[in-house]
Amino acid sequence: MKTTPTHRIRELTASGLWGDKTLCDYLQIQAELAPDKLAAIDQPNRDTFASGKPLRLTFSELHAASDAMAIDFLSRGIGYGDHVMIQMPNVVELIICYFALSKLGVIASPLPVQYQRHEISTLSQVFGTQWFIGIDNFKGASLAENGLAAVPESQIITMGTDVVVRGLGGLNAEQRQQLSDYRAAHPVDANDIFTVCWTSGTTGTPKGVPRSHNMWFASGYMTSSGSDYAQGDVLLNPFPMVNMSALGGFLFPATRLGCTIVLHHPIDVPVFLKQIELEQVNFTIAPPALLNRLAYEPALWHSFEFSALRAIGSGSAPLSSDMITTFEQDYGVKIYNIYGSNEGIALISSPSAVPDPEQRAAMFPRNGIGDIDSTSGEGAYVKSKVIDVDTRHTLENVGQRGELCFAGPTVFDGYLGLGAQDVFTEDGYFRTGDLVEICGEKGEFYRIAGRIKDIINRGGMKISPAELDTVLEGYPGLIEVAVCAYPDAELGERICACLVLQEGLSPPQLADLCQFLEAKGVAKFKWPERLEVVGQLPRNPLGKVLRHVLSQSVAGQPN
């Protein structure tokens, strides 16, 4: 499956921004160059959330294990072009699975572990799922069984460490020939779609984002060059390996550069810090709230030895300039502010590009605009502009606000089944849906000013309020309902349900609403954490609910 027009492939390949190698091609290169270097490491307390002992695989072992897994998939009938959903936490088997699927040319759709049957069933209808892969035990629950919302039981694969252990012995001669023959008959192109990740996009409904190997490697180059990765670095990934932050930030650049990926799930602060110390981690990412805590608790920081740690990336919310100063001046660790998305947005505010901590905390280099560029080496990969939300005219002056638009080799071609419907400008820039302000003395920076659409960003998990509205409308005694965001210092935003009740009825308890959503199979991270009863929902002349007015009211702000 390809989504990229021939002329775009030709242009980006000729410019050197896209290449001819796939994910598994780079794995084979690393297995030959550095067979004994550690490639993938589980966290030490893996048994607290998943079955099996922690795994530590070298590049040669990872290559062998993924070969064996690919043969196992072939024996089950999985092959080139098939659509496979994956639901696994951050364990080494997930990394092996990605490589095995890439060797067969399978299209993988990874899902957050929080998704339940409601989300899986909905997305599966869009994706056209043919197979489902999950683990048998995640905190006592079987993620493999969630696949019943997508496919028949016969098309569900339960992953376990036994599969990996068997694969470490390598293939026999007959299996090697079988895999070689299959791959020769079904060659995988770097422009083939490898993943379909899920995002709320810019219009408020879940959308599939098809991305090719080349798109991922371009995003990986942006992260690795912008964050100053070095060949052979040790990288600690605490974010779910299902979207841009982990795939573009770790899996693809690590494979290209021969880096070690240390896995963590979920954020367990003592374990996370101990991993940095024991594994001699060079780079990791962390949410702003954790970095703030570490900056305010120097005793906690100094209780560990972080001699190898060079830098930490963060994002999803404005950073604290005081936190950046503490880390860089007191701890000797650089802080990178990262802004990205599954669609391919990629901006990095690095210490070299933006030395001033106050600017770096909230601003990103306005790359790809005339002679404005960053000093991080990623300028050639980025084209950006700002357009007026109403007229769509390009804005260029300091202080102007508009929609950020993005183009370049990192950017996808359009949403699954929807293409480029009104999400690209006439000249091919992706309309991000994010409101930015042009700032800096010469207009050399962007400041993220908010979102044009109504997507709720709860701790980095993007939630469609319209989806929740639809489910909650079935709750007894409601005339209408709309959910909205309200600000939160820890997660950025939380969710409030605003209810219009039938006359004479008492309002439900928040727990009642959550129990209703649980019964509907809605993931817990989408449940509201606040409830407000209103006389009517604010609407515009066309009848559209004005969610921003609700948010302002809930937050106690003037309309």
Image: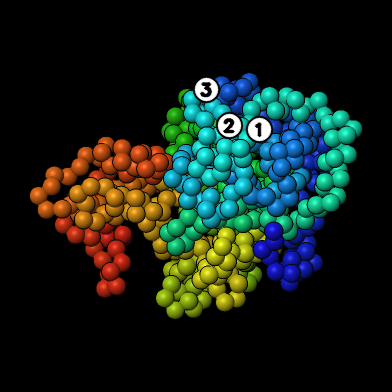
Q: Residue at x 43, y 59 (%)?
A: 204
Which mark is first along the chain, 2 or 1? 1
Which residue is disc 3 drawn over? 48
Q: Quadrant of the N terminus?
A: bottom right
Residue 171, percent across and down? 83, 31
Disc 3 versus disc 2: nearer the observer: 2
Disc 1 versus disc 2: nearer the observer: 2
In three-dimensional space, the C-alpha distance between marks 3 and 1, rounded to whole angstroms, equals 16 Å
- Is 242 or 105 nearer to us in this picture? 105
Say what secondary structure mark 2 lies in.
Answer: strand
Q: Residue at x 33, y 47 (%)?
A: 495
Q: Residue at x 20, y 42 (%)?
A: 508
Which residue is disc 2 drawn over? 135
Q: Quadrant of the C terminus?
A: bottom left
Which mark is first along the chain, 2 or 3? 3
Mark 1 touches mark 2? (CB < 8 Å): yes
Q: Within 10 Å of the Cα at label 2, are there few (<14), some (14-19), or many (20+) other Cα atoms?
A: many
Query: Residue furthest toward the left?
Result: 504
